[in-house]
Amino acid sequence: MAEISRTGISLEQDLLAGFDKLIARRGYKNRSEALRDLIREALLSEVVDSNKPVVGTLTLVYDHHVPNLSQKLTEVQHHGGTMVLAATHVHLDHHYCLEVIIMRGRSKEIQEMADGMLAMRGVELGKLVLTNSGNALGAGKR
Ligand code: NI
């Protein structure tokens, strides 16, 4: 286990109250645990433009009635080769499909591939979450 440093922070009362509500909703046991995760998330977002290996989860909601969209999304994933580890497709309703694509590779390449899919006409919602095994950022729950 990594050595732990203690630190104190100053912030406005209403900001702290909002933070406490958020962490209660998310099920954190204490502020430290929540703050560690927020810091890791911020550090990972800094990694986006680098060549560091990461794992990315891309969630897409798209209108499958848009001509060729399903094929185009599949094509991009095939083009990505070994970067795509898995993809799950759920038919949400008459119009919409949900797709979750798990990728591993250099953060820049994953970001580019995700951006390409997110920009396609008919993709209504989407979010890429980058993460890694945690070793590089001192992750691991205590
Ligand atoms: Ni579908």
Image: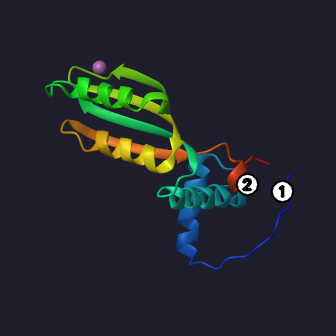
> Between residues 9 and 65, which one lies in front from this camera angle?
65
Give the residue at mark 2: 138
Residue 47 sits above or below residue 65 on the image: below
The quadrant of the picture showing ligand 1 is top left
The answer to whether the residue labelled 2 contacts the one labelled 1, judged by CB atoms less than 8 Å apart, is yes
> On the rendered structure, is 75 left or right of 27?
left
Q: Residue at x 17, y 25 (%)?
A: 68
Q: What distance separates the C-alpha of mark 2 from that of mark 1?
A: 7 Å
Q: Quadrant of residue 80?
A: top left
Give the residue at mark 1: 2
> Between residues 36 and 42, which one lies in front from this camera angle?
42
Label 1: which secondary element: loop
User: Which comes sooner in the sequence, label 2 or label 1?
Assistant: 1
Q: Report the coloring of the rendering.
A: rainbow
Q: Which amino acid does label 2 sit on?
A: Gly
Q: Residue at x 26, y 21 (%)?
A: 93
